[in-house]
Image (cartoon, rainbow, N blue to C red):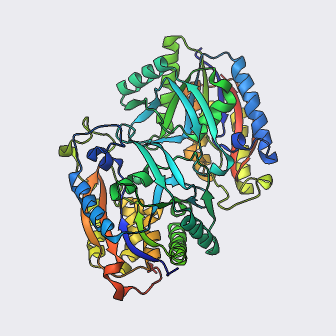
Amino acid sequence: MPIVSAFLVPGSPLPMLKPDNPPWRELVAAYGEAGELLAASEPDVIAIYSTQWMAVLDELWQTRPHLVGEHVDENWHEYGVMPFDMHIDTELTAACIERTNEFGIRSKGVDYDQFPVDSGTITASHFLNPQGRLPLVIAANNLYHDGAVTERLAATVRQQADALDRRVALVGVGGLSGTIFRDDIDPGDDHLASPADDEENRRMLELMTAADAAALRAALPAYAQAAKADMGFKHMSWLLGGLGDGYESARVLGYGPTWGAGSAVVAFTP
Amino acid sequence: MSKGEILAGYLAPHPPHLVYGENPPQNEPRSEGGWEQLRWAYERARKTLDDLKPDVLLVHSPHWITQVGHHFLGVPQLSGKSVDPIFPNLFRYSFELDVDVELAEACCAEASKEGLVAKMMRNPKFRVDYGTITTLHMMRPQWDIPVVGISANNSPYYLQMEEGLEEMDRLGKATRRAIERTGRRAVLLASNTLCHYHFSAEPKIPEDMSREHPQNYEGYKWDMRIIEMLRRGETDEVFRVLPRFIEESFAEIKSGAFTWMFAAMGYPRIPGELHGYGTVIGTGNAVMEWNLANHPVQLEVRDRPTAA
Ligand SMILES: [Fe+2]
């Protein structure tokens, strides 16, 4: 079984940049717990899809063997730098690229010094993969792909990991409800932008824990629209595509606001 | 200190392909050329900019996206390597630029007075976006004029388009007041593509111009209609049809730079000088200039003409 664990995690860099801010502490703790669960599942590789790595032409995959540097978020620059140090599983990535090209989704590797790694990927690997211990597969969010194509990409990772005998922790990086506060708030007072968003998010999280993959999949488009979910909630499609026919259980490790938007850490047991 | 003024505004789009086609030493990848019509358009714009001898270039870029507020570069010197996340094969550019922090702070303060959320970007490790870099390189490859870089709050995407454009109008007015107050002789650069329908694949040789043409005929016709109006100085008419143009041609102008620039200039009804038009991976790009110094008579500051 190549997928040994799966996690939905927030892409907002705020929990990484200001972990002590009270409204974000629950997410920070949950991110920490997810890191422990991930390690306990003993994966060989972490396969990350982050809504914030946007591609337009081809499906892009990170192929630079070692990515190291300091990132500054384009919006949250005032909160400091985000150091990163990541290794890529280039063999598994190459296999994924080749496979999707065979079934008509053009894929391309990116192997460039200083290529801008996105805040979501950096935040997820900061919490889930401290010291960059495990190698990664990182796939971009092509804006023209829908949920179904995104599922196929993750299924490709599962199949190729199977062929290469890799154990994979699957990670979908992105937010829940997408409405943020557009003005300056006191970070200590952060809360969901509206009770309606909060309700939508809670209903979606309940659906995840019910562990009925088909019902969850069917509910995604309506939720994405009602909650203005981050990038159509395609990071959930990534997880469903990788998990295949279904999963055994899911647990919400944490839920909270990130500048009004909804964020959650959810652990799925395949 | 004498009152500052806006000398000119340029529509100065930022396809990184233009830098790639030119092969400047700062850019890593090498090309066989390509997109000459647009690069020659920029050559003309470089000459007129040189004649203006401005103190500062202000650029609004859609590829520095800030969800919370309008941000201004606020570090005196910024450098690094800018790699385009969409076209990393074409654009890996080592840059070094000087920021006019005093003017940036004045713009930020005036924007706040307009009721906008405005912030200074003070992080010295910040990486300037490729839209800003490309526009600045194409206009002034010498990099010897200080700049003010302004982010896209993308309010026209986030809010209703009309509300968003109204915010950009206020940002433009704030920018004008800041320029006047600080005594700067300034040039504005709106880093925007027109019709933004594009091909979904690159040719094997990206600069193979036998493959370059408008992706969308309706979008092309819209571009020609808008350019024709701009060339005739029909500013009111342009702003009346702008929301429709944006919707129907998927124009990048939606991100606000064009409205910001016209608001700052006071929506002058003067003919824009078209330096050239061309497509890049199917999108429509015009390099145009509004030289205010050449048209002092028409220069009453006007409010934004709207569809209503
Ligand atoms: Fe652009």
Q: Can residue A116 be seen at all in this image of the molecule? A: yes
Identify the residue shown where x is 28% and y is 55%.
Answer: B216
Q: Residue pushed farthest left?
A: B210
| Residue B149 percent across, percent down from the top left | 50, 59
Identify the residue shown where x is 22% and y is 40%.
Answer: B32
| Residue B222 percent across, percent down from the top left | 30, 65
The answer to which of A251 and B108 lies nearer the viewer is B108
Classify B272 as above or below A159. Answer: below
In the rendered image, which quarter is residue A233 located in?
Answer: top right
Q: Is residue B208 left or right of residue A52?
A: left
Q: Quadrant of the N terminus of chain A?
A: top right
The answer to which of A186 and B33 lies nearer the viewer is B33
Q: Can residue A254 be seen at all in this image of the molecule? A: no
| Residue A165 percent across, percent down from the top left | 54, 10
Identify the residue shown where x is 30% and y is 62%.
Answer: B46
The answer to which of A208 and B30 lies nearer the viewer is B30
Q: Residue pushed farthest right?
A: A22
Classify A224 as above or below A253. Answer: below
Q: Residue pushed farthest front?
A: B1
| Residue A72 percent across, percent down from the top left | 59, 44
The answer to which of A176 and B166 lies nearer the viewer is B166
